Image (tube, rainbow, N blue to C red):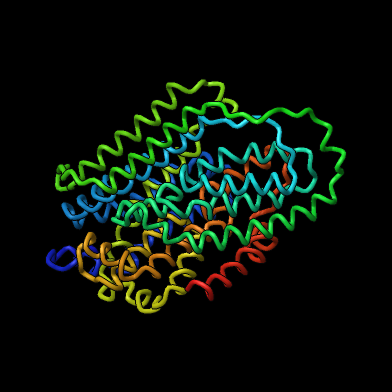
Amino acid sequence: MPFSCLAADPSIGLGSMLPVWSVLPFAGILLSIALIPLVFPRFWHHHFPKVSAFWAMVFAVPFLYFFRATALYEIAHIMILDYIPFILLLWALFTVSGGIHITGTLKGSPGVNTIILIIGTFIASLIGTTGASMLMIRPMLRSNAWRIYKTHTVVFFIFLVSNIGGSLTPLGDPPLFLGFLHGVPFFWTLHLFPEMAFAGISLLILYYIMDSYYYKKEILTAVHDDESEPVRIEGYHNFILLAGIIAAVLFSGNVRLGSISIGEIHQPVESLIRDVFLILMAAGSLFFTKKEIYHKNEFGWAPIMEVAYLFAGIFITIIPVLDILKAGEKGAFAWLIQWTDSPAHYFWAVGILSSFLDNAPTYLTFFNSLLGKFYPGMMEAPAVARLIVEQIPFLTAISIGAVFMGANTYIGNAPNFMVKSIAEEAGVKMPSFFGYMFKYSIPILLVLYIIMTFIFF
């Protein structure tokens, strides 16, 4: 059905009229993110903003031409209410955590390594998986620099700190923050504690056993080769700024101050206050933190710029996907709504896609699938209010699937590849894309998720 036909009757819901092929730009940008860095890494490094812009234009130009005011509203709505707060939070956490440097000598014994993993897993829900990964990976690598067998340590770091640890608050992982922006209460994610505790404790026990085995094979005399240096934290004032970020997000989720109109977009006043405060916290970190600390952390803007460019394209191209899903069984994805009829189905559907695409848009896609399945045609705010009370197992399934299974591949979550790159720069021989899967994630994580399916879903 051509777009011109769709625009002919504005009284009909947009989501129930859009055809399946309208989601092709969204599929195109996700596949580009997944495949081009692997096949053409140099091209991707120099041209990823153009790739994102290309797919955004492929969708936006005909969408705006045929739907005009409606299309403009849809694009402005998702960029103002979703994209800008999403990027501001990531930028603030990235900037402030980048101003904290942990220095000192820790000898990488199984006990010390396990403690570092526990700390990293815990703080991931407070400062985000990206922030926790960047804060903790270099101390972990320094403590194990003398060791021969350390690849498994970095892999478990990705499992726990870069992914599973971020499941308890909306600050922890981008999918959960998107849920928060769409009305899921800040503390609702504490419902995920049983699943997080089970997965975290299981992996920590397995890691300790594995690392103890490898530790016995090391040349233990190497432990005493380097002089010991006490552990200390530089840039500790940034913890105060991190507390400010947490307070700002809590404020926006619990205070209602009305709204202001930006065109036809109604923006809550408390959300604007939150966003201004996030900017102030990040600016405060840049102003008060010594430049040497950022230098020691090898801090740069490239990672957050890549996220900003790519998600601009993702948020624009995801518009037809969300509208179709909100239409429920009246939309082109009726088959998907009908097929995913249990929490276990949602857990695996979200998880598999999050493994190879990006877990944030995957979560948002299936979040809207739940709204379309249980409350088709209902306004989002009352639908979400009912969802978080009446369909807890389903929302838990997509939350856990998106956050946990982002660890299945290097491309499932942004910190994964960042940790891999930093580890390789430090001399750790990391497995290839498929080596990571077949040696670690499939035999370890896949088995864990199967067990969790029977226990929790």
Q: Is 9 situated left or right of 382 in this image?
A: left
The residue lying at 62 percent from left, 49 percent from top is 157
> Does residue 95 appear anywhere in the picture?
yes
In the image, residue 439 sits, relative to residue 425, either above or below, namely below
The residue lying at 42 percent from left, 47 percent from top is 171
In the image, residue 177 sits, relative to residue 225, either above or below, namely below
The residue lying at 40 percent from left, 60 percent from top is 363
Q: Is 443 situated left or right of 304 in this image?
A: right
Q: Nearer the viewer, residue 383 or 46?
A: 383
Q: Residue 338: where, in percent of width, then height?
A: 36, 79
Q: Residue 23: where, in percent of width, then height?
A: 35, 62
In the image, residue 233 sits, relative to residue 211, either above or below, namely above
Image quarter for residue 437? bottom right
Image quarter for residue 86? top left
Q: Is 241 situated left or right of 253 in this image?
A: right
For the N terminus, give its image quadrant. bottom left
